[in-house]
Image (cartoon, grey):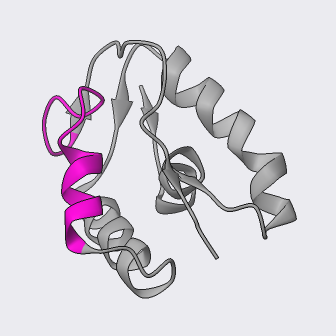
Amino acid sequence: MIGLDTNMLARFYVDDPNDPEAAKQRPIARRIVTGSEQLFVPLTVILELEWGLRAFYRFDASDFRRVVGTPYWAGPCQRRRMAPGCPGLGLTG
């Protein structure tokens, strides 16, 4: 089982066109998240992701609810095989 950190989840869910490192890291994050049989996401990572989406990326709380409300999240800390595709969040401006 692979444990995910906040950076991996942020790269998976956020498409930041102004961050060249994100452009390099996002395909890796997508491959790991969509191609792994089981992933472990600690509660602290979920909390930090929520904070990062709101504080750094300026997303609304409803954006975070949309992320954790997707089929990618079977529960707060662990999920099994996920369907292909990603409901990514795009940055504007």
Left or right: residue 55 versus residue 71 is right
Q: Quadrant of residue 90?
A: bottom right
Query: Relative to 89, is 84 above or below?
Result: above
- Image quarter of the C terminus: bottom right
The image position of residue 12, as x and y in percent, is 55, 44
The image position of residue 82, as x and y in percent, is 35, 16
Of residues 21 and 5, the one drawn nearer to the viewer in this rendering: 21
Residue furthest toward the left? Answer: 75
Q: Residue sitting at 37 percent across and 66 percent down?
A: 49
The image position of residue 42, as x and y in percent, is 28, 53
Q: Residue sitting at 52 percent across and 57 percent down?
A: 10
- Image quarter of the N terminus: top left
Left or right: residue 42 versus residue 37 is left
Residue furthest toward the bottom? Answer: 55
Query: Relative to 12, is 22 above or below?
Result: below
Of residues 55 and 28, the one drawn nearer to the viewer in this rendering: 55
Query: Relative to 34, is 49 above or below?
Result: below
Left or right: residue 28 versus residue 91 is right
Q: Tell me if residue 53 is in the magenta stretch.
A: no
Q: Residue sitting at 29 percent across and 61 percent down?
A: 63
Q: How many marks?
A: 0
Of residues 69 and 76, the one drawn nearer to the viewer in this rendering: 69
Q: Quadrant of residue 32?
A: top right
Q: Which residues are magenta?
A: 61-77
Residue furthest toward the front? Answer: 93
The image position of residue 56, as x and y in percent, is 50, 84
